[in-house]
Image (cartoon, helix red, strand yellow):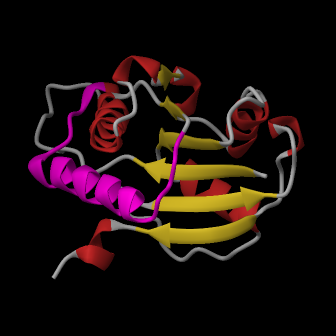
């Protein structure tokens, strides 16, 4: 079995018109939401053994916050700039190239690609994919090369856990 967690980056700051889109930072809500979601992963006993992140500041910052909270080594986060402005096919190529030594992988990236990818890989209709959403898919395969259609395990996002 292989497990994939698609994580959309947390909320970013739109007030920085002097930043390129790639460089936009998380805002305070985004930082808080990333921590909240990391704690949900811990409560669910999700054991990530590989994190691949878009190099965009907001995605990489989200990955770093989650990694820190779940005690994943920050230096082991792989940055893949192909995730930024990618297509579903590019994302599938990235997934299919993951080493088979990894069982549970998190990809951190962007909409609309992650919304569409979640539907493609799970054959589910997903109505919304808010910032800091986490969509988990299980694949009954031995190799990442075989990954295509899987089964949705869960979808969580910050608003589910806020009072």
Asked whether, in this view, residue 23 is left or right of residue 47, the answer is: left
- Comparing 134 with 17, the one in front is 134
Name the chief secondary structure element in magenta: helix
Examine the rendered structure and indicate whether residue 68 appears above or below residue 4: above
The residue drawn where x is 54% and y is 61% is 135
The residue drawn where x is 78% and y is 31% is 100
Say which quarter of the image contains residue 71: top left
Say which quarter of the image contains residue 144: top right
Q: Quadrant of the C terminus?
A: bottom left
Asked whether, in this view, residue 70 is left or right of residue 16, the answer is: right
Q: Is residue 26 magenta?
A: yes
Q: Position of residue 11 (x, y in %)?
A: 25, 51
Q: Position of residue 57 (x, y in %)?
A: 30, 28
Asked whether, in this view, residue 130 is left or right of residue 49, the answer is: left
Q: Which residues are magenta?
A: 23-48
The residue drawn where x is 76% and y is 32% is 93
The extreme bottom residue here reads: 163
The residue drawn where x is 85% and y is 57% is 140
Q: Position of residue 91 (x, y in %)?
A: 67, 38
Count of number-bearing discs: 0
Examine the rendered structure and indicate whether residue 124 appears above or below residue 54: below
Examine the rendered structure and indicate whether residue 143 appears above or below residue 20: below
Asked whether, in this view, residue 32 is left or right of residue 161, the answer is: left
Q: Is residue 157 magenta?
A: no
């Amino acid at each position: 079995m292989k497990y994939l967690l698609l994580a959309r980056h947390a909320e970013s700051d739109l007030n920085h018109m002097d930043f390129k889109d790639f460089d936009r930072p998380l805002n305070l809500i985004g930082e808080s939401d990333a921590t909240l979601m990391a704690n949900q992963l811990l409560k669910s006993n999700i054991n990530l053994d590989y994190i691949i992140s878009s190099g965009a500041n907001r995605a990489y910052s989200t990955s770093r916050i989650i990694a820190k909270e779940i005690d994943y080594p920050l230096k082991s986060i792989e940055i893949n700039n192909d995730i930024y402005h990618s297509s579903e096919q590019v994302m599938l190529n990235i997934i299919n190239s993951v080493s088979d030594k990894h069982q549970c992988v998190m990809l951190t990236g962007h909409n609309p690609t992650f919304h569409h990818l979640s539907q493609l890989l799970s054959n589910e209709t997903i109505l919304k994919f808010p910032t800091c959403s986490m969509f988990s898919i299980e694949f009954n395969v031995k190799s990442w090369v075989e990954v295509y259609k899987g089964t949705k395990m869960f979808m969580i996002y910050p608003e589910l856990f806020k009072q």
